Structure formats: C-alpha cells, structure tokens
C-alpha cells in the first residue's frame, strides 16, 4: 500500500470518528495546556526548594506521560473495532492499562539506552519498536514480547519504515517550527500553552490513526522471521534506566551545588567581615593581617584560601589562625 493511500485511509477514519477521538485525547490536551505554566512556576521557585520543586515537576511530567498512554491506548481500542464503540467502551481496563504502560516504559528505556550509546542505535530502536504498543493492544503481547514482536514485523523493512513511520511528523514539524518562532517573538506563555494543547487535540488522533493503519498493513504483508535476541533489548533497557538515574541524581546535585554558590555569593554581598583585635594585641603587625583578611573575605574568598595565602607570604600560621578565629560579621 502506498504512503498516499495510508494517509487517505487514516484521514477517512480520523474524520469519521473525530468527536470520539477528540474526547479520548482531551485529558492529554488539558495537561499540555497547563504544563508550560507549571514549568514556568518551577523555574521561578527553584531557588527555594530544589528537591521538592524537582519532584513536583517530574510528577507533573509523569502525569502527562500516563495521560498520553491512556489516550493512545483508548484510541487504538476504538480503532481495532470495525465500528465506533464510543468513548467509555474504548477505555482500557485498569489491569490492561498497567500492561500497556509497562510496554511504553520498556520502549522508552530501550530507546534511551540506544541513544546513550550513539544516535544510530537509538534510531534503530525507535523504528524497530514503533509497533510495540500496537502489538500490546491489538495482539495482546506483554512486556518484552511486544517489543520483540514489533521488531519481527519491521525486520527486513527498516528503511521503508523509517520513512513511513515519520510521515506525520514531516507534515507537523514545519508548522511547529514556524509557530514556535512566532510565539517566541510574542513571548506569551498562554498562547504557547493554547497552541500546544490544540496540537494535541487535533494532530495526535490522526497520528495514532495513521500508525494503526500502517500496523494493519504490516500484519498483511508480514513474513514470519526469527525473533531478535532478547538480551539486546534487556541491555538497552538497563542502560536507559541507568542513564535516567544518573541524570536525575546529577541534576539534583548540580542544582544544590549552584544554590550553595548563590547562597555564598549572597552572604558575601550582604555581610561585612571585620576582625575583633581586642584580644590580639600581642601579635606583631596584627593590623596588617586583619586588614588583608577582611579585605579578601569581603571580596568573596574563603577563609581557607586567605589562610594559605598569608602563610605562603611568610606570616606565622599560629598568628593567622588566631586572626581568622576572631573574624566577625555585621
């Protein structure tokens, strides 16, 4: 089946079930409407409580992923029936949704693990695993079996799938780039959120319809092949999980480090250091040492650095330590 025919069939199904699809994808659209505002709040408040704000942002992002999988699965459930079964009947059962969610997580981890290695392995996985969720919903395979089955369908047709899988994106990406450029010039979070929400609402159902029609076509022309080694996917998922943990941990550490630096800078800007020399009269030239200490501390240098410089300059370590112990702030 030609790509043009695939697009025509997808458009026909999309138009025929437009209202049902719109309602099914509405939760994701509503989430996308509020996400830019939530992200902006995170950026503005991140100086207050890094870990709490990061957890809130990750939780909100996770909610978006859950709603996205729910909408995707619901539309597939509707599409696999010859007639429009309506909104309520399209919803997956709770146990079924957990299974589909697990497949989605595995696909993400394997793709991420491949991308960590290099761009090419990530792209290979992205295409080979394109039908994983469709296999889970339509054929009932679970976990890695759904991923392996998707790989089987595409084996020997990778280049053909590379083009066909990203046909919808070829239509929407230019529009996104142009619109984002215009919205950036306007600098309106509300307009950006509204446009993103409309994209979810109008484009996502068509993209899922196209993916479903393409999957049915692959089922029709499928020639049985051996399954790829499961170990490849397991290793990819492990690398993806490891990378995710490292990135989150690194982000938390880096953010806390930056906050500590900002805290020290703030203190240095607002606190004035001086040396109480009332108990240091027995130190020769105490005024010289005290002047050097206060001047450099007020410039933002740490006490350890100031101490090393003084000792390197020939001042007795005992005298330097006594002066530093007498540093006060006002």
Image: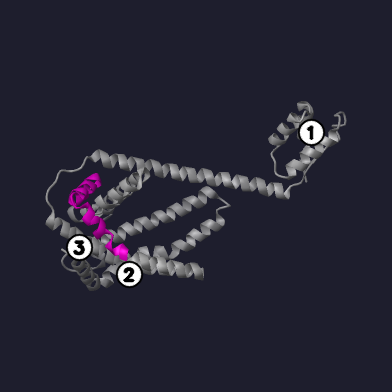
Q: Secondary structure at mark 2?
A: helix
Q: Which residue is mark 1?
A: 323
User: Is 265 on the left-hand or right-hand side of 188?
Assistant: right
26 part of magenta stretch: no
Q: In the rendering, which numbered label is found on residue 213?
A: 3
Give the mark, 1 or 2, whose residue is nearer the N terminus.
Answer: 2
Q: Are marks 1 and 2 in contact (CB under 8 Å)?
A: no
To which quarter of the image does residue 3 belong? bottom left
Q: Secondary structure at mark 3?
A: helix
Question: Relative to the observer, which residue lies in front, 224 or 42?
Answer: 224
Q: CA distance from mark 2 to mark 3?
A: 18 Å
**Visible residue check, residue 90:** no
Q: Which residue is mark 2?
A: 202
Instruction: State which region is magenta.
Output: 142-170
User: Is 248 on the left-hand or right-hand side of 8?
Assistant: right
Give the mark, 1 or 3, whose residue is nearer the N terminus.
Answer: 3
**Visible residue check, residue 6:** yes
Q: Counting other residues with Cα less than 10 Å from the Cα at mark 1, is it few (<14), some (14-19), or many (20 or more)?
A: many
Q: Counting other residues with Cα less than 10 Å from the Cα at mark 2, is it few (<14), some (14-19), or many (20 or more)?
A: some
Q: Secondary structure at mark 1?
A: helix
């Amino acid at each position: 089946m030609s790509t043009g025919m695939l697009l025509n069939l997808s458009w026909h199904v999309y138009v025929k079930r437009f209202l049902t699809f719109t309602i099914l994808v509405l939760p994701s659209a509503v989430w996308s409407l509020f996400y830019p505002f939530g992200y902006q709040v995170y950026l503005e408040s991140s100086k207050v409580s890094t870990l709490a704000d990061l957890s809130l942002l990750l939780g909100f992002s996770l909610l978006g992923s859950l709603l996205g999988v729910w909408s995707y699965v619901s539309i597939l459930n509707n599409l696999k029936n010859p007639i429009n079964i309506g909104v309520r009947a399209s919803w997956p059962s709770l146990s079924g949704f957990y299974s589909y969610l697990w497949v989605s997580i595995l696909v993400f981890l394997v793709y991420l693990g491949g991308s960590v290695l290099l761009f090419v392995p990530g792209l290979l996985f992205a295409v080979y695993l394109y039908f994983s969720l469709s296999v889970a919903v339509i054929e009932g395979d679970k976990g890695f079996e759904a991923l392996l089955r998707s790989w089987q369908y595409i084996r020997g047709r990778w280049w053909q799938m590379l083009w066909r899988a990203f046909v919808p994106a070829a239509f929407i990406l230019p529009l996104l780039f142009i619109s984002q450029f215009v919205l950036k010039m306007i600098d309106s979070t509300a307009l950006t959120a509204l446009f993103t929400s409309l994209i979810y609402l109008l484009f996502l159902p068509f993209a899922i319809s196209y993916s479903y029609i393409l999957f049915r076509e692959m089922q029709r022309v499928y020639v049985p092949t051996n399954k790829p080694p499961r170990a490849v996917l397991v290793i990819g998922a492990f690398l993806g999980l490891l990378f995710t943990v490292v990135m989150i941990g690194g982000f938390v550490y880096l953010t806390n480090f930056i906050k500590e630096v900002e805290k020290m800078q703030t203190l240095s800007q607002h606190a004035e250091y001086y040396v109480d020399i009332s108990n240091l009269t027995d130190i020769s030239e105490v005024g010289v040492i005290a002047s050097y200490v206060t001047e450099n501390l007020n410039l933002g240098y740490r006490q350890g650095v100031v101490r090393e410089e003084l000792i390197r300059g020939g001042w007795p370590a005992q005298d330097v330590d006594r002066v530093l112990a007498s540093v006060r702030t006002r």
